[in-house]
């Protein structure tokens, strides 16, 4: 039997979504590398985190994280921001804690991508 036009359309759409997700992941990996390279030390990470934790609650919301990236000279699109933020927000609570930032920061060598993004940069 031949696939219906709806099934073919859904299949093409799913492939498109997958390609867009892959491209976003690659772009996010590059942006995270820029952020990581701009942070020379754990002390600088702490200072930048505290400076952008506008409400002092010990975590960064996406807008606060965007400000941190901007102040480091890393320009991110909305899609890149979401992908970068989600890569660091390990418990998916829509905020990045200092501990999550440190874990992300430590997961990099001085110039290596973190394990979860490194395989995408081949």
Image (cartoon, grey):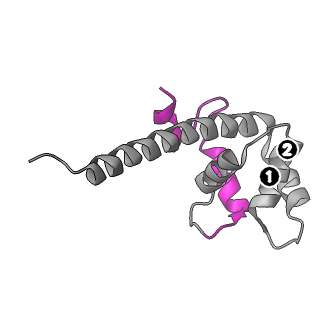
Q: Position of residue 98 (x, y in %)?
A: 74, 61
Q: Nearer the viewer, residue 91 or 73?
A: 73
Determine whether label 1 and label 2 are within 8 Å by CB.
Answer: yes
Q: Position of residue 36 (x, y in %)?
A: 72, 39
Residue 110 located left or right of residue 19: right
Q: Residue furthest left?
A: 1
Task: Tell me if residue 24 can be seen.
Answer: yes
Q: Is residue 19 above or below residue 13?
A: above
Mark 2 neighbour class, 10 Å CA radius: few under 14, some 14 to 19, many 20 or more: few
**Which quarter of the figure has residue 74?**
top right
Give the spatial CA distance, label 1 vs label 2.
Answer: 6 Å
Residue 81 located left or right of residue 16: right
**Which quarter of the figure has residue 88?**
bottom right
Q: Position of residue 84 (x, y in %)?
A: 65, 48
Mark 1 neighbour class, 10 Å CA radius: few under 14, some 14 to 19, many 20 or more: many
Q: Is residue 54 above or below residue 51?
A: below
Residue pointed to by mark 1: 66
- The answer to whether residue 120 is magenta is yes
- The answer to whether residue 60 is magenta is no
Q: Secondary structure at mark 1?
A: helix
The span shown in magenta is 93-122
Q: Is residue 70 above or below residue 63?
A: above
Residue visible at 70% across and 54% down in the picture: 101
Task: Tell me if residue 115 can be seen.
Answer: no
């Amino acid at each position: 039997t031949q696939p219906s036009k709806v099934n073919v359309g859904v299949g093409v759409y799913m492939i498109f979504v997958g390609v867009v997700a892959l491209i976003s992941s690659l772009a996010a990996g590059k942006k995270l590398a820029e952020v990581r390279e701009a942070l020379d030390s754990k002390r600088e990470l702490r200072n930048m985190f505290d400076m952008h934790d506008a409400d002092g609650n010990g975590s960064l919301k996406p807008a606060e994280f965007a400000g941190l990236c901007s102040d480091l000279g890393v320009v991110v699109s909305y899609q890149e921001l979401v992908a970068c933020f989600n890569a660091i927000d390990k418990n998916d609570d829509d905020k990045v804690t200092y501990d999550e930032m440190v874990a992300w920061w430590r997961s990099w060598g001085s110039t290596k991508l973190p394990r979860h993004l490194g395989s995408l940069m081949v």
